[in-house]
Image: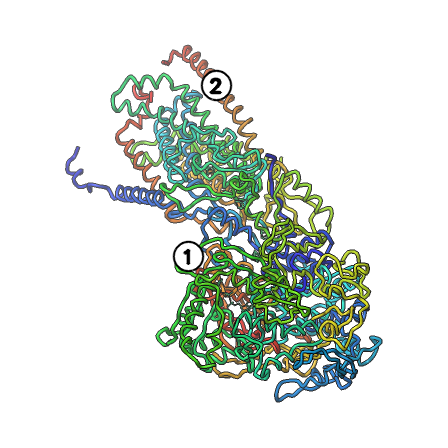
Amino acid sequence: MNMGIALRRPPIAPAAVVLGALMLLGFVVALIRYASGLGAISNLNDNYGWGLWISFDLLCGVALASGAFVTTSIVVLFGGERYRPLIRPAILTGFLGYLMVILALLVDLGRPERIWYLIIFWNHHSVMFEVGWCVMLYTFVLALEFSPLVFTRLGLQPPHRLIHAFIVPLAVAGATLSTLHQSSLGSLYTILPDQLDKIWYTPLLPLMFWLTAVAVGPAMVILESTISSRVFRRGLELDLLGGLARWIPFILAAYILVKFGDLAGSGELDLLVDWNLESGLFWLEVMGFAFLPMVLFSLPAVRQSNAWLLFSALLVISGVILSRFAVSLIAIGRPEFAASYVPHPLEFAVTIGIIAWGVAVFWFAARYLPLFVKHTHSPAGEQA
Amino acid sequence: MAKMAILFDAFRCTGCRGCQVACKQWNDLPAEETRNTGSYQNPPRVSADTWLVMQFREVDNGDDGLAWAFGRHACMHCVHPACVSACPVGALYKTDEGPVLYHNDRCIGCRYCMLACPFEIPTFQWNEGLFEGAEIKKCTFCIDRLSAGMEPACVHTCPSGALMFGERDELISVAEARIQEHPERYIDHVYGKDEAGGTSLLYISPVPFQELGLPELGTEPIQEKSEDIMTKATPAVLVTMLVGLSGIYWVVKRRQEMMGKKTGARGR
Amino acid sequence: MTNDWTDIKNSDCILVPGANPAENHPASMAWVNEARDKRGAKLIVVDPRFTRTAATADLYVPLRSGTDIVFLGGLMNYAIQNKLYNEEYVKYYTNALTLVNTDFEGPADLDGLFSGYDAEKRAYDTTTWQYQTEKQTVTVTETDPDTGEEVTVEKEVSVIKQATSLDDPNCVFAHLKKHYARFTPEVVEQVCGTPKDKFLQVAETFCATGAVDKSGTIMYAMGQTQHTVGTQNVRSMAMLQLLLGNIGIPGGGVNALRGESNVQGSTDMALLFHILPGYLGTPRDVDVDFAAYSRRFDTTSYWVNGPRFFTSLMKAWYGDAATKDNDYAYDYVPKITGNYSWITLFEAMYGGNIKGMVCMGQNPAVGGPNARFERKAMENLEWLVVMDLFETETASFWKGPAVQPKDIKTEVFLLPAADALEKAGSIVTSGRRSQWRPQIAAPPGEAKYDIWILTRLANALKDVYAPSSDSKDSPIIDLVWDYGDEPDVELVAREVNGYALEDVKDSSDKVLVNKGELIATFGTIASAADPGTIACGNWLFGGYFYPTDDGTGAVMPAVKRRGQKDPSPYGFYPYWGFTWPANRRIIYNRASARPDGTPWSEDKKVIWWDGDAGKWTGYDVPDFSATKAPDAKADPAKTGLGAQAGTDPFIMQSDGKGWLFAPVKLNEGPFPEHYEPLESPIENPISSVQNNPVIKLWDTDRGEDVGDNVGTADQFPIICSTYRVCEHWQAGAMSRTLPWLAECQPDMFLEIGEELAQEKGINNGDQVVVSSARGRIQMVAVVTKRWRPFTVDGKKVHQVGMPWHFGWQGVATGEVANDLTAHVGDGNTMIPEYKVFLVDVKKA
Ligand SMILES: Nc1nc2c(c(=O)[nH]1)N[C@H]1C(S)=C(S)[C@@H](COP(=O)(O)OP(=O)(O)OC[C@H]3O[C@@H](n4cnc5c(=O)[nH]c(N)nc54)[C@H](O)[C@@H]3O)O[C@H]1N2
Ligand SMILES: Nc1nc2c(c(=O)[nH]1)N[C@H]1C(S)=C(S)[C@@H](COP(=O)(O)OP(=O)(O)OC[C@H]3O[C@@H](n4cnc5c(=O)[nH]c(N)nc54)[C@H](O)[C@@H]3O)O[C@H]1N2
Ligand code: SF4
Ligand code: SF4
Ligand code: SF4
Ligand code: SF4
Ligand code: SF4
Ligand SMILES: [Mo]
C-alpha cells in the first residue's frame, strides 16, 4: 500500500463525520423519548397514533428489505443460480433493513421493553400479532442466512456447514414468512373499512402489499448494487441486474390489474374520477410508478443501461413508498383531523439516525466481510 | 351478569357536561390545559386524561330552525370490539358483562388499537417515558363502580335523564319504545343496536347521528375482514407457501439435476 | 317559586322566558322531561339567544332583550281576545271586577305614562290608581287598651267596590283589556323582533293552559329581572298566570329559578335592606314608633299578624331587653331613610361616604354592575374584609387591571371561610323547601364556618361596647348572642324556628307551648295572647325545626327529614325537609278549587272543601283558613282573614285577590308598560317615553371613563347581554379555580352571530375587543348560528352576548364582563340592568 496516499487522506472522512453525527443525533433523540415520552420528540397524537415511523421505517422499510427474500428465492428455490452474486448483499441489506425496522419499533412502541410480550401473550385474531411474529422469525432467518459470512470471516467452519445444510428450508421459511408479513402489513389496514379512503381501502390490501414488495425487491437490489458499486468502486453486475429486472413488469402488470379489478369488482370505479387528493395519489402511483416502470423495464434498452435501470428502479421504489404513505397516513382518518399531524423534525432525526446506523453497519460489513464475490463463478466463493 | 349498556338520548341531553366532569372526578383524571378556539367543546377530543367529551355542533335546518347537537364521545364498548381484535397481546379484552377493558401490564404500546377503533377512542399517554410507563387510556365503563353495584359515574350524574344504564336488550326496547311514542322527536333508528355488529352505547337522536359525531358504519363488525384474513387466509397462505415453495424447489432441482446429468455440469 | 321543582312534572306547558335552566338549573330538566314524557307537555323557550335549553325545547322563540313586557302583554292580549282565560277564576280570584278610580288613566291615553306622573321627582302620585271604595258602618268588638275589657264600637270602614260584570268600563279587567289591546302580534313583532307566526305559536300553545284541566308553568330567572323594568316583567308573568288560572294548581305557578344555592334562604332571612326576616318591612324613619310601624301592615289580610311576628323577632334578638314597655326594643332597630341597595351603596362608596366593607361570600369586583367603577369605589375604603373560600378578585382588587397596588391604601383582610359541605346547616331551595345538610368534611387549613367568624365579631363588638352606658350602644350591648363559644348551628336553627320563652297561652289562657319548647307553627305566634312570650327568628320558618314524623314513624326536626312517602299524585313529598310556610308545597292552593270548593278538575286537584267535616282537605296543607267555608262572606267588621271571603285565595293580599292591577307597591304603574332599556338601539316604538320613568339615574363623573356614561346607538350600535354558562359559577371564584371546570370553559368569550361576525371580519376563535360607554375588554370570539339579528321597528339590530364569569384570579382567567355594564337598576328593586346594554365589537 502506498503510504503517501494513505497519509494524505484525512484520518476520518467527512462523510463519516456526518454519518457519525446523524447516528449520535438519533441516539440522543431516542434517549429523550425514553425519558419523557413520545410526545417529547414527536407530533404523534391521539388522532394520528401512527406517523412517520410506521409509514416509513416500518412499512417502507420492510417492503424495501424484500430484496433479500426475492433474491434468495430466485437463487435457492427457483434455480436462478446465476444471480448468486447478488445474494449476499441482498441478505445483508435485508437483515440490516429488518434490524432498522426493529430499532424504529423500539423507539415507536409505547412499551419497547415489552416487545417480547408478543411471544408470551397471543391474540391470533390480531394482524399485528402476525406481523410481529413473522418479523421476529424472519429476522432470525435472515440472521441465520447471513451468519455464514461472519463464520467465514472468523474461519469457523462447523457452524458454517451446519447452516449450509439448512439453506433450502431457510429459504422456504424466509419466503413464506416474508409473504405472510409483507402481505399482513397490508392486512393491518383492512380493519379500517370506514376510516381509510374508499379508493385505497380493499380487503385485497395484503395482496397489493405483497405484490409491490415482490416488485420492489429486485428494484432495491438494483439500487443497492449501483450504490455499492460506486462506493466500493467495483464493477456492476449489469447483466444480472438486467436479468432480474425482466421479471418486474409481470409483477407490476399483475398489480395494476388487481388494483383496477378490485375497484371494478366493488363497483367503485367512479371514485377514480373524483379528482381529490386520494384519487390523485392513486393515479400518480398507478401511472407514474407502476405503469411507467412496467413499460421501461420491459424495454431491453433500459435493462442494458445502468442509468435507465436505476431510474426505473427508483420509480418502483417511489411507488412503494407512495402507496405505503397513502394507505397509512394520507388517505386515512377523518378529514377534520388531517391537519393535526405533520411529523416533528425530531421524528425525521430518528428515521435518519437509524438509516445512518444501517449505512454505517453496511459499510462496516462491506469492508470486513466477504460480501461481494467476483462475478465469475468461483467454486470457493459461491456458497454463501 | 347480563350484558350491560348505556342509552344516550340526544333529545334529552342538554349538553351540560356533567357527565364529562363526573368521569374525570370518579376516575381521578387531571384537567388538561385548554384554550377556547371558538367552541364550547373542550378538551377538543378524548385523550388519556379525558375519557368522555361532549361534542357541540350547530346544525342549521333552514326553516325548521336551528339544532344544537350534543354528542357523547367515549368508548362504545362494542359487542365485537375492533380494538380487542387488533391488540396483538390481548391487552384489551371484552368482558361478558359488556365492558371492554385493558390489562395495562400487557400492553406493548403499539397503538394499533387506536387505529382500529372506528370511534377514535383509545388514546395514549404521550408524555410518559420509559419509567412512568405509557399506557393506553379510555373509558372503563366504570367497571369499579359496576362491580360495586353502582351505575357509571356519567350516568349517575346526568341531570336531565339523557343517560340510562341497564341491560342492553332492555335499553334497546326502551329506545325503540321512545321512538315509537314520539316519532316526531326522533330519527327512527337506534344507533349502536347493529352498527359495527352492535355497541354497548346506544343512541337515539332527533338529528342525524353524524351530527352527534358518530361515524356511518355498516352492520358487520369492523374487524370482519381482517379476522377473516387472519383465521382463513393466513393459514391457507402459510400452507400453500410451504408446500408450493418446497414443490417448486423440488421440481427445479430435479430439472437441474437431469440437465446436469445430460451436460455433465458440476452440481452438488 | 309558588310551586316546587318536582311540581314541574305536573305541567302541560312549560314556558321559559328569560332563564336557561338546562345550564343554570340543570337538575330541573329531569322534571321538565318527565312532564314532556308523561303528559306530552311542551317546552317553550323565549330567549334572545339559542341556549342549551332552547336546544332541547319543542319551540324556541327569539326576542330582543328587554322587551318581555310586550311579549307577555301580547300573550295576555291573545288570551283576552280569544277568551282563553279562565273566566270564573278571573272573576272570583283576581281583582278583575274591582272598580278603579274614575280618574285613572293609562299609557293608552297618556302616551306611555300613567296618571299622576311628576317628571321632576321622577315619581308617581298614585292617588288616581286606587280602588273605588265606599264607606260602611260596622260594629266591632275591641279590647279597651286601658281597662282590658271587651267593648263594642261603631266604626266606619271603607269597602272596596266591585263591578258586577267584566264589561264595566271602570273595572280592572276593562282597563287591562284596553291596556293590552295595544300589544297585538304585529306590535310584538315590531318591538321584540319575534316573527309573528312564532309568537302566535307560543300564544296558542301556552294560552291553551287556560282550560280548567290544564296547567302551564313559567320558569323564569335573570332574563326577566335584570332590567330597568325587571319587576314589571315579573308582574306580567304573574298576571298572565292569573288570567289563565294557573296559580295555585299543580304544574302551574310563577316560578323564579333562584340563583345562589341558598339565595332563597338568604332572602327569607332578609339579606336585603328593605326587609327583616320573614319579609317584614324594615322600619323607616317615618315609622316613629312601634304603633306607627304596625300600621304599615294590612289589617284585612294575614299580614294583620305582622306586628306579632315582629314582636317575637325582637324577642329573639333582644330577649329580656325587649319588653312591651319599650315597644319590644323597636328603637334598637336601625331605621332606613332611603334606598340602600347595591348600586346606591357603591355610589356612596365612590363618593367617599363609606369607610369599610365586609364582603361575606360575594365578589363585587367581578359581579357588580360597572365593576370597574365599583372597584374604583373600593379604593376609597379604609378597610375591606373578605370572608371567602378563595382569594377572590374583590380580595385582590388592588391587583386588578390598570391598578397600581402602591396607590391603594385600603387595608384588606381575607378571612378563609368554610364552604357549604364543611359545615352543617339548612339551606332553602327555590321551591321554598329547606333541607338540613350535615357537615361532611373538615374545613381545610384555618378556614372557619361563617357563624364562627360572626360570633367572634359579635363578641368582640360587644366587648368594645360593654363599658358604655350610652343608650345608643344598647342595641349592641343588649343583643342576645347565645349560640355558644363554638357556635352551635342547631341553636340558631332553634331560634329561627321559634321557641317559648315562657309558657305560651292563648286568649283563653290555655297553654299552647310550654316554656323552652319549640313552636310547631307560626300560627302559635298569631294566636298567642302575648307574642312576646315567643322568640322566633323568622316566622315563616315556624315549625321547621320542630320534631316531626318523617312518614316512617321516626321523629326528627322537620328540616332534617328525608321521608320519601308521598300521599299526593304530584310529587309533593311532604315528609322531605320543610317547605315554608307551614310545609306547604303550592302556595295560594285555595285557587286549585272552584269558588264553590270543588276541584277545577280531577287531574289538578290539590285541596277541596269537605262539607261534612267542615274543613279543607286534600294533598297539601291548605293555604287558607282550614275551616273557612267557600261560601263564607267577607266581614268588614273583622280584621285579618275574617275580612276576606271564602273565595279569596290570596290571603296575603289586602283584598284576598290576585292583582291584575296593582294600586300600590309598584313605582312605575299598576300595569306593566314597555319602556326601552337604558341603552337601546331604537326609540320606543310604543310611546314617546323612552326609559322607565321612575328609574334612578346617577350622573357620577359623566364624561369620565369610569363613570355612569350612557352609550348611544351611533357609537355603540350592538345590543349586548351577559349570562351564565353551565360550566362556571357566578363571579368564578368557585369554578375558575377548579381545573376540571376551567378546562371546559377556559377563556372569556363573546358569542357573536355569523352575519355580524362576517360584517366585522371576525373569524371563529379570533380575539375581539368589546367596548361600551363604560369600558373595553378583550376576549375570544365564538362565531355562532345561535345569535341571529333581529328586525325591530323595521331596522336590523344585532345582539351579542358573553358570560360574566371571568376575572383575573384562578386557573381560567379573563377580562371582566361587568366592566361594560351600566350602573343602573330597576325602578323598584334596583337590580342592575345586566341583560341589556350597548356595545361595539372590533377584531383585536
Ligand atoms: N351553572 C351555573 N348555574 C347558575 C349560576 C351560575 O353562575 N352558573 N348562577 C345562579 C344564579 S345566582 C342565578 S341568579 C341563576 C340565573 O339563571 P338564569 O336567569 O337562567 O341565568 P342567565 O344566564 O343570566 O340568564 C338567562 C337567560 O336570559 C336571557 N336573556 C337575556 N335578556 C333577556 C330578555 O330580555 N328577555 C328574555 N326572555 N331573556 C333574556 C339570556 O340570553 C340567558 O339565556 O342561575 C343560577 N345557576
Ligand atoms: N353582568 C352580570 N353580572 C351579574 C349577573 C349577570 O347576570 N350579569 N348576575 C348577578 C347575580 S344574579 C348574582 S346572584 C350576583 C352574584 O355575585 P356574587 O355573589 O358576588 O358572586 P359569587 O361568585 O357567587 O360570590 C360568592 C362567593 O362566596 C364564596 N363562598 C361560597 N361559599 C361560601 C361560604 O360558605 N362562606 C363564605 N364566606 N363564602 C362562600 C365563593 O367563593 C364566592 O367567591 O352577580 C350578579 N352579577
Ligand atoms: S369503541 Fe373503540 S375502543 Fe371502545 S370497544 Fe369499540 S373499538 Fe374498542
Ligand atoms: S397499544 Fe397496547 S392495548 Fe393497544 S393494541 Fe397495542 S398492545 Fe394492545
Ligand atoms: S362509564 Fe365511567 S369511565 Fe366511562 S365515560 Fe362514563 S364515567 Fe367515564
Ligand atoms: S350529563 Fe346528561 S345532559 Fe349533561 S351533557 Fe351529559 S348526557 Fe348530556
Ligand atoms: S348545580 Fe347543584 S343545585 Fe344546581 S342542579 Fe346541579 S346539583 Fe343541583
Ligand atoms: Mo343570582
Name the residue nearer the viewer: A110 or A146.
A110
Residue B139 appears in the rendering? yes
Residue C283 at x, y percent in the picture: 58, 79
Amino acid at pointer 1: Pro
Q: How is the image coloured?
A: rainbow
Q: Secondary structure at mark 2?
A: helix
Residue C791 appears in the rendering? no
Left or right: B206 as drawn, with respect to B53: right
Residue C829, compared with residue B81, is above or below; it is: below
Q: Which residue is mark 1?
A: C444
Residue C387 at x, y percent in the picture: 44, 66
Residue A91: quadrant of the picture: top left
Residue C219: quadrant of the picture: bottom right
Amino acid at pointer 2: Ile
What residue lies at 54% left-to-right and 27% top-to-bottom? Answer: B231
Q: Which mark is residue C191?
A: none
Q: Which residue is mark 2?
A: B248
Mark 1 Cα-neighbour bin, 10 Å: few <14, some 14–19, many ≥20: few
